[in-house]
Amino acid sequence: MALHHAEPGEIVDIRPLGARIHETVNATLIRSKHLQVFRLLLPAGKVFKEHAVPGEITVQCLEGEVEITSPGRTQVLAAGELLYLGEGDLHGLKGLADASVLVTVLLPEKA
């Protein structure tokens, strides 16, 4: 079964999951030629290892609290806050309190 990705003009529900956070899975919500948007779930204690993506990204905390590490700095992102990272910036995430984040990736033009 193919995963559903939103079509242009389609409304996508990104409200906090609350108690449903433990029964929900990570999901790509939008995928196009130059844009990817996905919801990442980070229950307390879960680690998403350090990595880099080929484009600029934003990480918006929808609920809970996450620790974001990047070279030389560690920050805490709480519900309602957004972080911007440049193209290729190494970063890792850790759930401090059950959290869901909305990640938007601007995919670079392929040569």
Image (tube, rainbow, N blue to C red):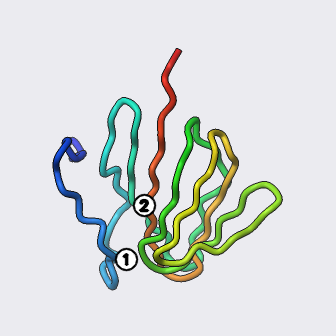
Q: Residue at x 64, y 71 (%)?
A: 67
Q: Residue at x 74, y 68 (%)?
A: 74
Residue bearing mark 1: 22
The residue tagged with tag 1: helix, strand or loop? Answer: helix
The residue tagged with tag 2: helix, strand or loop? Answer: strand
| Rendered location of residue 15, percent (x, y) | 29, 72
Q: Which mark is residue 102?
A: 2
Is the residue 43 above or below the residue 10 in the image? below
Is the residue 104 above or below the residue 13 in the image? above
Mark 1 belongs to which amino acid?
His
Is the residue 107 above or below the residue 67 in the image? above
The answer to whether residue 61 is left or right of residue 73 is left
Is the residue 67 above or below the residue 2 in the image? below
Q: Residue at x 79, y 54 (%)?
A: 71
Measure how far apart labels 2 and 1 are at the Cα level.
16 Å
Q: Are marks 2 and 1 in contact (CB under 8 Å)?
A: no
The answer to whether residue 34 is left or right of residue 52 is left
Mark 2 belongs to which amino acid?
Leu
